[in-house]
Image (tube, rainbow, N blue to C red):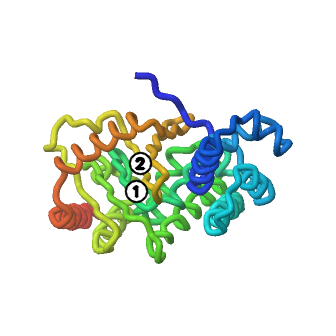
């Protein structure tokens, strides 16, 4: 099966706007060439707006709505709100970290995560970033990215900690994480850091919008052995996407067939993992074991 990489990380608002503008044009029985001629905008620009590969402005959207003879004031304002929201996402809180975020291909993920209504992740080797302590994040980023300076590492740690703040907002997404035993048992430099990380996972499990499940070694071979992934859901009608990272780049899958496959794998993994209550007990047990290992 050929998987295509999404080369543009489109905001949820831009994706919704693109679909609705395309539907309105088709309802008006106009071609892109027709609209380009009437509005005096290049056909290529209109095409990229309708695929979400390019943003637009309130002025152009008003012209398009006039061209499509859309007079419903509520509908017009809804579409203009989508334009404004997309423009606002061009100035996100992580922009001040742009130097390191851009070089690590992290910005596209942050754009999507910040708009998601639910997040489902499988992590075979690491604790998910949204659940990491600062000390744990610093240790693993330092080891995983020897090409980064100490200042760049700290910038990524700061971004990771700031991301976690959204879990306590009024419109916080739900988070469901399945974490493999390898991620929990992996020795890092500081036993105390590992113990504190387990304590954070126990505490996070008490959050009403967070579900954590531990996938033990005894589960044997399973469908998640291909590696980690993140499923992100958005407000209707925007479809789900899957985000997959590797050493040199990140890939966003949007095709429904690909997304359904990952949903199937996630459901398989959560059915093999321990229930959340048993997961907490296992985390506490491992934390006590680490405490006994301290010199």
Q: Is residue 206 left or right of residue 3?
A: left
* Front-lying residue, 219 or 175: 175
Residue in the picture at 82% in, 45% down? 39
Residue identifier under label 2: 230
Image quarter (top left, top right, bottom left or bottom right) of the C terminus: bottom left
Q: Is residue 191 left or right of residue 236?
A: left
Q: Earlier in the sequence, mark 2 or mark 1?
A: 1
Position in image of residue 184 (x %, y %): 29, 54
* In the image, residue 177 above or below residue 199: above
Residue identifier under label 1: 119
Residue 232's label in the rendered image is none
Q: Residue furthest top?
A: 1
Q: Splitting the image into 4 quarters, where does residue 221 fall?
A: top left
Position in image of residue 208 (x %, y %): 31, 74
Image quarter (top left, top right, bottom left or bottom right) of the N terminus: top left
Label 1 Cα crowd, 10 Å radius (few <14 / some 14-19 / many 20+): some
* In the image, residue 244 above or below residue 116: above
| Contact (Cβ within 8 Å) of mark 2 with mark 1 | yes
Residue in the picture at 25% in, 36% down? 223
Position in image of residue 225 (x %, y %): 29, 35
* Front-lying residue, 232 or 282: 232
Position in image of residue 10 (x %, y %): 61, 48
């Amino acid at each position: 099966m050929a998987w295509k990489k999404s080369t543009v990380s489109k905001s949820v608002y831009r994706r919704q706007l693109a679909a609705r503008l395309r539907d309105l044009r088709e309802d008006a029985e106009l071609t892109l060439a027709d609209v380009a001629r009437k509005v005096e905008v290049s056909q290529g620009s209109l095409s990229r707006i309708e695929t979400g590969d390019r943003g637009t402005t309130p002025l152009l959207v008003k012209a398009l709505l006039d061209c499509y003879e859309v007079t419903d004031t509520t509908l017009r304002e809804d579409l203009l709100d989508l334009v404004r929201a997309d423009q606002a996402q061009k100035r996100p809180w992580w922009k001040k970290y742009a130097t390191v975020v851009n070089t690590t291909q992290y910005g596209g993920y942050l754009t999507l995560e910040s708009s998601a209504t639910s997040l489902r992740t499988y992590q075979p080797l690491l604790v998910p970033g949204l659940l990491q302590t600062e000390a744990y994040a610093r240790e693993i980023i330092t080891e995983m990215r020897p090409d980064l300076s100490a200042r760049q590492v700290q910038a990524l740690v700061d971004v990771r900690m700031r991301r976690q703040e959204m879990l306590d907002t009024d419109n916080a997404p739900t988070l469901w994480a399945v974490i493999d035993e390898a991620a929990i048992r992996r020795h890092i430099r500081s036993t105390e850091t590992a113990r504190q990380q387990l304590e954070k996972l126990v505490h996070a499990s008490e959050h009403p919008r967070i579900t954590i499940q531990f996938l033990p070694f005894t589960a044997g071979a399973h469908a998640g052995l291909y590696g980690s992934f993140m499923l992100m859901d958005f407000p209707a009608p925007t479809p789900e996407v899957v985000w997959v990272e590797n050493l040199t780049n990140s890939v966003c899958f949007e095709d429904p067939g690909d997304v359904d496959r990952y949903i199937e794998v996630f459901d398989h993994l959560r059915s093999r993992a321990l229930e959340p209550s048993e997961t907490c007990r296992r985390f506490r047990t491992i934390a006590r074991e680490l405490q006994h290992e301290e010199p």
